[in-house]
Amino acid sequence: MRSLYTNGITLIFSIFRNRFMTEHTRVPLIAANWKMHHTSIDAEAFLQAMQAAQLPDDRDVVICPSYTSLHIFNAADTAFSLGAQNMHAEVEGAFTGEVSATMLVDAGCSYVILGHSERRAQFNETDEQVNAKVVTALHNDLTPIICIGETQEQRAAGNTLEIVKVQVEAALHDLTQDAIDDVVIAYEPLWAIGTGETATAEQAQEVHASIRSIVGEKTRVLYGGSVKPDNIAELMQQPDIDGALVGGASLEAESFLQIVQY
Ligand code: PGA
């Protein structure tokens, strides 16, 4: 009796401890995706506003400007990290107009957004290409922020979880669990990107929980799609939402800072 009781207490304690540990070891991450906006003058002003602000030290912040503004941030002493919005899967070669992982590292990047839906839709990026880029990024010490998400039609047809599963598994194809622990997934429902229409916290949590069941407890899973100062707090309360990938609301330092300081 006594040892059963003791074992029971030990088991309950370890379940609580694991739950506490896993929920608290994923450092929140807020990333800005500027897309094709802003020149270096705008980047300079944004940088100054960021430097004047107090960034909370319990979360990671990443700015992904255009390639041509990376140097503005790289030259400065900042409390946030730098990322790019895309890269080629090869590290060098005859690929006119492309940028490689080693070039991004050279320009001060530690993150790179890969497989954004705009790249998939407008530049025909495939799941296989995204996977190849993820592998190259990891080999070069860049943390990939891998974007996935369903269209309005796919959601209406009830296929969201299946679509997302296929995209996640394809992007992570052949990666070890250690490597998967290091990537960042950004769930961005296409119907919510740039539309002002955000997934509800419950809709997002449902998809995040299903992504979590594929990637495990250590991988950070961000939500993206019309994240704004007034919806970030509710999103961040969800147990499987570890941060946000912010487009439109990241273009002005004021609104981005409000999201960072949720
Ligand atoms: P949005 O963009 O915040 O403007 O919806 C997000 C994204 O595309 O990464």
Image (cartoon, helix red, strand yellow):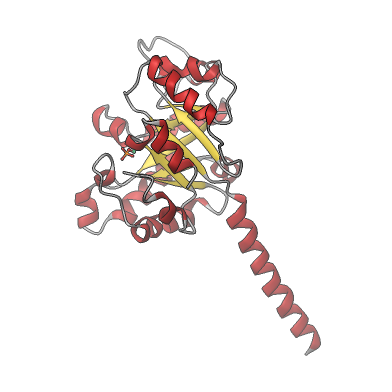
What quarter of the picture does the N terminus occupy? bottom right
Left or right? Give the position of 20 relative to 158.
right
Please state if 181 lies on the left or on the right of 243 as rendered: right
**Percent x, y for residue 43?**
42, 20
If the picture is divided into quarters, which one holds ligand 1?
A: top left
Q: From where the camera sits, is residue 174 visible?
A: no
Picture quadrant of residue 37: top left
How many callouts does the rendering have? 0
Residue drawn at point x = 32 percent, y = 57 percent: 200
Examine the rendered structure and indicate whether residue 147 appears above or below residue 198.
above
Looking at the picture, tell me which residue is in the foreground, 222 or 172.
222
Asked if residue 17 is positioned above or below residue 12 in the image, the reply reads above
- Asked if 232 appears above or below 97 in the picture, the reply is below
Side of 45 where 179 appears, left or right:
right
Is residue 15 something that shows in the picture?
A: yes
Q: Residue at x 27, y 43 (%)?
A: 190
Horizontal and vertical percent for residue 86? 40, 26
View extreme (right): residue = 2
Whole-percent x, y for residue 222 in the image: 44, 46
Provide residue 4's location: percent of width, then percent of height.
75, 84
Tell me the residue at 72%/78% (across/down).
9
Give the quadrant of residue 205.
Answer: bottom left
Q: Residue furthest bottom?
A: 1
Looking at the image, which is closer to me, 181 or 93?
A: 181
